[in-house]
Amino acid sequence: MKPYASSLDDMMGEAAFDVLAKAKALEKKGRSVLHFEIGEPDFDTPKEIVNAAKHALDEGFTHYVGFDGIQELKDAVCEHVNECLGYEPSTDQVIILPGVKPGIFFSMLALVNKGDEVIYPNPGFPTYLSLIRYLGAKDVPIYLNERNDFEMRADEIENKISAKTKLIIINSPHNPTGGVCSKKGLEEISAIAAERGTWILSDEIYSNMVYEGKHFSVSEVDQARERTILIDGFSKSYAMTGWRLGWLVGPKRLVERMRLLPLNALSCTSSFTQRAGIEALSNSEVKGWMKSMLDTFRKRRDTIVKGLNSIEGFKCHLPKGAFYAYPNVRKTGMKSGEISDLLLNRLGVATLPGTAFGEGGEGHLRFSYASSLEVLREAIGRMKKAFNE
Ligand SMILES: Cc1ncc(COP(=O)(O)O)c(C=O)c1O
């Protein structure tokens, strides 16, 4: 008999951490490895944010706080949503959490029953499928590919939705493809969700990383708002992955009940980190810093996409958001896993196979371009040498 609950067998790990461990092992042996596997900005958290946390610590702001977040941060989130998305939620619709992942976890625990169906993007962030399975629900993938510009299309959802569909998960901008859902597409998905009485979970962790135009959230569609949980956070936009801070906004009828989940699991999110979050959302210097980070990512995007397109067998779409390049490598004749292993072991270039994000990722690789232009050029050089000569 297993020493643990059988439901744990349905949970899955994350390949990014496995590849990182392999890459580190190679480095320990003296090999040079260029890192494109982990999805985190290579920038330091802005000093204004760090200072706000230090100040809170010096003040002794180190005790339990409200289980759904401190009032000032919830207020700041409401203002931020108003400024960015044009509607102002009330603070009782907000829960502050240690990152976006707990937002995904608690939302799914709050909504999904055994036997329900959940529509989700494939390839997609691995946590979605892991939780669908863990909860005993049925996963209903929407396959994303170049043909549909890596958008989760309403007509495909329409084809797969059923009376059992409880939830549609949307992630725009999207990990791993860099795809962005259009306003029209999100309006169409909202109409389907409203007609079928389905919930929407919108993971918008890359909301501040859209290269052209403005981010559009499904929660901006009136019809969708009453059935949408919007999750966003600080990890990527403010280079705060290690701080663990995020938020969710949802309809009051759901949020007032689901707050019991963080209450029972966490007691509260770290108090002084929340003070840093207020600074991140309200400091004008930080806004300028974010713009320059995005400009840097845009330059890197253009460099890596051009470079990847110069490698035989690679074809890379221009990502519209996030910081991932997602080339199609089918013409190399190799499987994603094989080519990712080869790049790491032979060339010292650490990437993730598309299949780390579901079977819909076969034929692709993900490069997280959170590295300097020099590192990007060096990696392209190594790959060109191996594939073009
Ligand atoms: C789509 C997506 N959602 C959620 C997360 C996790 O965010 P956090 O670190 O805030 O928990 C990530 C991290 O890579 C992500 O790519």
Image (cartoon, rainbow, N blue to C red):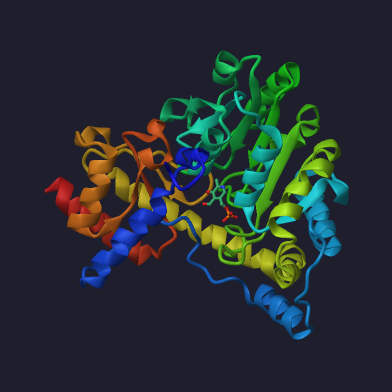
Does residue 214 appear in this view? no
Q: Residue at x 66, y 55 (%)?
A: 233
Does residue 225 appear in this view? yes
Quadrant of the rendered image containing residue 251: top right
Q: Position of residue 99 (x, y in %)?
A: 63, 56
Q: Position of residue 39 (x, y in %)?
A: 47, 55
Image quarter of the N terminus: top left
Q: Position of residue 159 (x, y in %)?
A: 56, 14
> For this view, does 71 lie left or right of residue 106?
right
Q: Residue at x 73, y 48 (%)?
A: 261
Compared with residue 146, is residue 291 higher up or lower down, i.e. above or below? below
Quadrant of the rendered image containing residue 249: top right
Q: Residue at x 81, y 41 (%)?
A: 257
Compared with residue 376, is residue 53 higher up or lower down, i.e. above or below? below
Compared with residue 110, is residue 190 higher up or lower down, i.e. above or below? above
Name the foreground residue: 47 vs 115: 115
Quadrant of the rendered image containing residue 49: bottom right
Q: Position of residue 27 (x, y in %)?
A: 26, 69
Q: Residue at x 33, y 52 (%)?
A: 351
> For this view, does 175 lie left or right of residue 46?
left
Compared with residue 201, is residue 277 higher up or lower down, i.e. above or below? below
Among all residues in the image, which is located at the extreme bottom? 58
Among all residues in the image, which is located at the extreme left? 389
Number of numbered callouts drawn: 0
> For this view, does 307 lie left or right of residue 177?
left
